[in-house]
Image: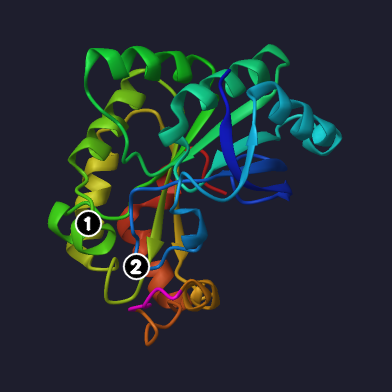
């Protein structure tokens, strides 16, 4: 029996896809982002609660009255793709009940192999939209930020776009780390090659997660970094041409 390890639910999400969403946070992630808001989800073998896909659907479907015409379910993390089989079965049940599904991913587990792509295609067939967190374009900078390279992530973005699945690209703006004009420009040039991108969002860095890091005994390296100003955010949005995408609002 397929089971998934779920960290928590947020029943009235307003920023994780179109409309009002029930947001499912999965357990487990290979990345170690220096600004991670959910470091308690890193360990994929401990924590959270085990559900079958049907059990999870029965739980989230209670909130369908909130979703109206354009809301639905978003699966975030952690990294949902680490539980690919569970995620696919869950999304298929959602689709059978005409529930809009959003995959919120950083793309790290993606593999360009026939075995993986066969499973990934099955997931995409039940996915309404992908929220893709493109942390940086430069691979070396990405490694310093997350401890992981990003070539396969960019490859995944191309693959999803080729399948004509709508994509919302998200970029967390960390002053002095992810805000260089060069990397933002290169990110935009890459996004331009993805026809299915519908929206680009700049998300300002916040230090809200510091207490979690301290509680877990993990050193936090960005204690002196401030939230970007509105001017800095606007500058990044201009470089990324966020107003040029059809779902800009």
Q: In this picture, is 239 found above or below 13?
A: below
Q: In this image, 89 relative to 59: left or right?
A: left
CA gap between label 1 and label 2 equals: 11 Å
- 223 within the magenta span: no
Query: What is the quadrant of residue 151 in the picture?
Result: top left
The residue beneath circle 2 is 34
> Residue 125: x percent and y percent?
49, 14
Q: In this picture, is 141 found above or below 160?
A: below
- Mark sitting earlier along the chain (1/2): 2
Q: Residues within 10 Å of mark 2 (few under 14, many from 20)?
A: some
Segment tinted magenta in the rendering = 217-221
Q: In this picture, is 178 found above or below 137?
A: below
Which residue sits at x=86%, y=34%? 65
In-front residue for pair 113/42: 42
In-front residue for pair 37/181: 37
Q: In this image, 134 relative to 113: left or right?
A: right
> Residue 190: x percent and y percent?
23, 42
Which residue sits at x=40%, y=48%? 29
In the picture, the quarter occupied by the N terminus is top right
> Residue 79: x percent and y percent?
44, 43
> Residue 61: x percent and y percent?
78, 29
Which residue sits at x=70%, y=30%? 56
Q: Give the tally of numbered discs.
A: 2
Which residue sits at x=54%, y=17%? 126
Q: Residues within 10 Å of mark 1 (few under 14, many from 20)?
A: many
Residue 164 image label: none
In-front residue for pair 246/97: 97
């Amino acid at each position: 029996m397929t089971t998934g390890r779920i960290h928590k639910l947020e029943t009235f999400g307003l920023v994780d896809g179109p409309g009002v969403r029930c947001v499912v946070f999965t357990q487990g992630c290979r990345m170690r982002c220096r600004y991670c808001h959910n470091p308690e989800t890193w360990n994929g073998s401990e924590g959270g609660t085990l559900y079958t896909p049907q059990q999870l659907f029965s739980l989230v479907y209670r909130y369908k009255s909130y979703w109206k015409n354009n809301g639905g379910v978003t699966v975030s993390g952690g990294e949902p793709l680490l539980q690919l089989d569970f995620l696919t079965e869950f999304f298929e049940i959602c689709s059978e009940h005409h529930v809009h599904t959003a995959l919120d991913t950083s793309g790290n587990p993606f593999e360009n192999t026939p075995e993986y792509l066969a499973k990934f295609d099955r997931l995409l067939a039940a996915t309404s939209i992908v929220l893709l967190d493109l942390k940086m374009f430069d691979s070396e900078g990405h490694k310093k930020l997350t401890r992981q390279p990003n070539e396969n992530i960019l490859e995944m973005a191309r693959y999803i776009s080729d399948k004509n699945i709508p994509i919302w690209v998200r970029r967390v703006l960390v002053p002095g780390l992810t805000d260089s004009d060069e990397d933002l420009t290169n990110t935009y040039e890459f996004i331009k090659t993805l026809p299915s991108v519908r929206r680009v969002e700049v998300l300002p860095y916040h230090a809200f997660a510091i207490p979690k890091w301290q509680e877990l005994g993990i050193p936090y390296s960005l204690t002196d970094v401030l939230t970007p100003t509105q001017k800095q955010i606007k500058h990044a949005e201009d470089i990324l041409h966020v107003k040029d995408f059809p779902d800009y609002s």
